[in-house]
Image (spheres, rainbow, N blue to C red):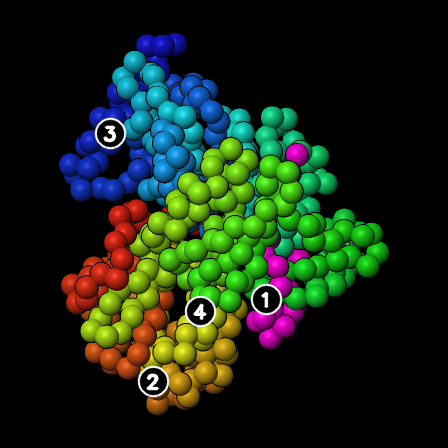
Amino acid sequence: MKLLLSSAILTGKLAAKLSRVCGYGGSSFPGLLARLFCPGALKKLAAQVRKGIIVVTGTNGKTTTVNMITGVLQEAGFKTISNREGANMISGITTSFIMNSIASGKIDCDYAVIEVDEASIPEVLDNLSPRLVVLTNFFQDQLDRYWELGKVIGIIRDSLLGQSQTTLVLNADDPLVAQFHRTTCLPVYYFGLAADKNTGKRDPTAREARLCPFCGSLLVYNYCHYGQLGAYSCPDCGFKRPKPQVEAMEAGEEGVYSLTYPGSMVPSIAALEMQTQGLHNVYNALAAFSVSILLGVNLQTILGGLRKYRPAIGRMENFRHGNNQVYLNLVKNPTGFNQGLETLCEDRGAGDVLIVLNDNFADSRDISWIWDVNFEMLAARQKHLQCFICSGLRGEEVALRLKYAGIPTGKIVANASMNQAVRAVLGGNRGSTYIFSTYTALRPVHKIIESLVEKGDKSDQGMPSVS
Ligand SMILES: [Zn+2]
């Protein structure tokens, strides 16, 4: 068996080297090959992780949450491995373990922090037996790549039922996530975001999770931060947003949140400072904070690690162009796109917008999801915005969508050439520029921007995952 594992590791490492030499970045292939040689390879490697495995899953925020947790644990001096490259299905995860092991089959690490694609959860949990499982949120994703939301949630719940040693770290603000306490009976730790001065201004109608998961009655929402994330309660069975152990409140200063968390004796307060924008990143930081507290990391180390965190490519990544800021954001589903648009709308200095939409397999072949994106909020602010450039393989459809959203056609430009489109939007020079790109356009767009601007902050965290 040991020989089998060794040959699987050597084959995997060789495959990784070959694909690098041949110019393929693919990180799933080595794991796939290794699993053919030794189907038990992942289980054997995972069993050697000394202090435990942390699994992060959910629709949005997986890559960022994994990178934040990994940053904190490394700051605390732990040897940590993760699938930063974002290959988040069983083969890609196997690759990460293989690349961190030596030929004899030994792996030397304290923690493994692993992002897992929702659909791969059953097989991955079976192999990893994680100490903690983080559920970020559940939104309807690209319909042709994923199953219906209810089915995804059911599959994750069923696979958790076999994990008696696991503690769940749950987003209290998402009823689809918070229900896991009752449906799995596992120990849970909640994180959430309290109401703030903007909550009342946002639309309290949830797109998903309108019904109570337990009795089917209409849930009542006091407020929503975005999507269905907010304060909900069921008038019939009493299911409601649980009081989170870790809760953030906006502290007034931009980018600073006041956190309450269970201190040694009484609830304590800490100031969370971040260099990333957007409420979704506050949720990611809350998840990372909760995990780190549960693992016993010292408070100052956690806060320091989170403060240092820089977004990966295309996660509201920031560049400077002359006197202006440029933000690049990966978009792949309506909720994530709406979050990016909200950040744009809250930025009083925003000037120009570029949307690059491709429809290759990794982007989703079906682009009908753009009709669920709330571009109408851009229309409401269009007086302050100068120009909307649409590019990529399906740039014209975005242009059409913007027209239907109520943006004057005189402000909409479709340009099939990504190069010209990026140059045009940066050439506008009328305040901050927001660029939204689907997955397969992200690298090329990133390259073009980099050739034209100085970097606002350094990012070396590789490509985010496709899901
Ligand atoms: Zn109910």
Measured in 3D between alpha carbons, the distance from the residue under mark 2 to the one under mark 4, in whole angstroms, is: 17 Å
* Residue 196 tag number: 1
Residue 266 location, quadrant: top right
* Residue 138 tag number: none
Badge 3 is on which residue?
Answer: 15
Q: Position of residue 148 (x, y in %)?
A: 59, 52
Which of the two discs, 3 and 1, labels the residue nearer the N terminus?
Answer: 3
Q: What residue sits 46% from the left and 60% below the top?
A: 256
Q: Quadrant of the N terminus?
A: top left
Tell us which disc is closer to us: 1 or 4: 1
Tell us which disc is closer to us: 1 or 2: 1
Q: Is disc 1 placed on a helix, strand or loop?
A: loop
- Closest to the observer, 121 or 252: 252
* Residue 386 tag number: 2
Which of the two discs, 2 and 3, labels the residue nearer the N terminus?
Answer: 3
Q: Is residue 9 above or below residue 370?
A: above
Q: Is disc 2 placed on a helix, strand or loop?
A: loop
Q: Position of residue 412 (x, y in %)?
A: 35, 83
Which of the two discs, 4 and 3, labels the residue nearer the N terminus?
Answer: 3
Crowding around mark 2 (Cα neighbors within 10 Å: few <14, some 14 to 19, many 20+) is: some
- Closest to the observer, 336 or 294: 294
Q: Amino acid at mark 1?
A: Asp
Crowding around mark 1 (Cα neighbors within 10 Å: few <14, some 14 to 19, many 20+) is: some
**Residues rendered magenta in the picture:** 187-209
Tell us which disc is closer to us: 2 or 4: 4
Q: Position of residue 357 (x, y in %)?
A: 35, 66
